[in-house]
Amino acid sequence: MKTSHIIGIVVIAIAISMIIVAAGDASQYVSFDEAFAKAENGNNQNVHVVGKLKKDSNGKYTGMEYRPHIDPNLFKFILVDNKGNSVKVTYHSPKPNDFERAEQVVVVGKVQGNEFVASKILMKCPSKYEDGKVETIEAESKKKI
């Protein structure tokens, strides 16, 4: 075989292995019921859960806990998924800006105990520049070394 053929085969093998690794790390969109079921079965992969912030009968948000003077890297809130399940979500980073303005929230993370621990929060907020369009804001946890 020519050297160029061997190099081509090696490049293709590396590309295929990268695709397999990336596909294995991809997480799924699920409800809280499915996320808890996966955790009970020992599946510890990240999942996406879509929902809205919990409101009381007056339209005010309930269940939000953020005390930056005590721990600025601890934010807890209640998220109601698309099936109506309410679960407490813990996020070990500061509360994202304009969090209360979010029309819809996507949390990425894992079930731990009886709560969902988010590593990333994605928010769909109404755009302040154009009526009727939605902008996406992403808040990622910062890795501490």
Image (tube, rainbow, N blue to C red):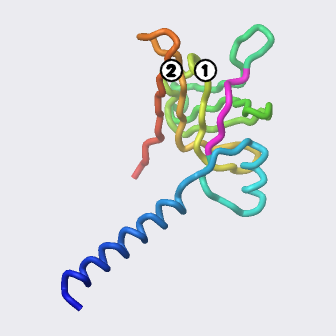
- Dot 1: what SS? loop
* Number of other residues with Cα within 10 Å of mark 1, as a class: few under 14, some 14 to 19, many 20 or more: some
Q: Secondary structure at mark 2?
A: strand
Q: Nearer the viewer, residue 8 or 52?
A: 8
Amino acid on which disc 1 is placed: Glu
Magenta region includes residue 86: no
Q: Which one is nearer the viewer's eye here, 96 or 84?
A: 84
Numbered badge on residue 103: 1
Circle 2: residue type? Val
Q: Main secondary structure of the magenta part?
A: strand
Question: Which residue is depicted at the point 52% across and 26% down?
Answer: 68
Image quadrant in which you'd find residue 130: top left
Magenta stretch: residue 52 in it?
yes
Mark 2 crowdedness (10 Å alpha carbons): few <14, some 14-19, many ≥20: some
Q: Judge left or right: residue 62 versus residue 27.
A: right
Q: Which mark is residue 134?
A: 2
Looking at the image, tell me whether mark 2 or mark 1 is earlier in sequence order: 1
Query: Magenta segment range?
Result: 48-54
Verify CB contact (< 8 Å) between mark 2 and mark 1.
Answer: yes
> Residue 5, position in %: x, y?
24, 82
Quadrant containing the N terminus in the rendered view:
bottom left
Q: Identify which residue is drawn at 42% across, 48% down.
A: 144
111, 20: nearer the viewer? 20
**From what the image shows, is residue 14 above or below residue 119?**
below
